[in-house]
């Protein structure tokens, strides 16, 4: 499954109205490549979040795992009270996986087949990647060490 496939699936699910109004989106991405660009992956996933929430986040809280970040945790709050929570990691899995949970006020959408995710579909412009790199650096609440 590619990010484009996932975008179409979310669009279709939202158009049926069965979920109701989206309230929260949770994305958990594990990349096999230990040198993966987490800022680029974040930019790609936040573009997917735009399918669900048309606004931009009003606040971002970020937390990194260590000084050479191989894990990011982001909480994006939106003006209407909605949230996007991202957990991204690299180098700790044999293959890349993406778990998705969309919570609406009438139901949920859950991604099945997370192990079939094609991480080559995670692309973003340099501008988007730089934006999320700076956003994480500026909004980090501190470095969590094991």
Image: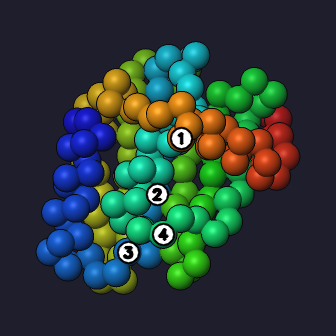
Q: Residue at x 22, y 62 (%)?
A: 11
Mark 1–mark 4 CB contact (< 8 Å)? no
- Chain-order first, disc 3 or disc 4: 3
Q: Residue at x 56, y 37 (%)?
A: 127
Mark 1–mark 2 CB contact (< 8 Å)? no
Q: Which residue is mark 1?
A: 128
Instruction: Reply above or below: 123 against 110.
Output: above
In the picture, the quarter occupied by the C terminus is top right
Say few, some or many: other residues with alpha carbon within 10 Å of mark 1 (under 14 / 14 to 19 / 20 or more). Answer: some
For mark 4, give the secondary structure.
loop
From the image, state whether disc 2 or disc 4 is nearer to you: 4
Residue 22 — which label? 3
For mark 3, give the secondary structure.
strand
Can you name the residue that lies furthest to the front here? 127
From the image, state whether disc 3 or disc 2 is nearer to you: 3
Q: Which residue is mark 2?
A: 26
Say few, some or many: other residues with alpha carbon within 10 Å of mark 4 (under 14 / 14 to 19 / 20 or more). Answer: few
For mark 2, give the secondary structure.
strand
For mark 1, give the secondary structure.
helix
Viewer-nearest residue: 124 or 92: 124
Q: Residue at x 77, y 52 (%)?
A: 139
């Amino acid at each position: 499954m590619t990010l484009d496939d996932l975008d179409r699936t979310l669009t279709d699910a939202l158009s049926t109205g069965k979920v109701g109004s989206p309230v929260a989106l949770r994305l958990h991405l594990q990349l096999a490549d230990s040198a993966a660009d987490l800022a680029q992956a974040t930019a790609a996933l936040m573009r997917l979040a735009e399918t669900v929430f048309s606004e931009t986040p009003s606040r971002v809280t970020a937390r990194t795992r260590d000084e050479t970040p191989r894990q990011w945790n982001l909480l994006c709050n939106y003006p209407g009270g909605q949230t996007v929570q991202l957990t991204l990691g690299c180098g700790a899995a044999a293959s890349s996986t993406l778990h998705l949970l969309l919570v609406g006020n009438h139901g949920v959408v859950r991604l099945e087949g997370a192990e079939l995710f094609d991480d080559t579909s995670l692309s973003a412009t340099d501008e988007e990647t730089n934006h999320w790199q700076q956003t994480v650096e500026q909004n980090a609440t501190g470095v969590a060490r094991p």
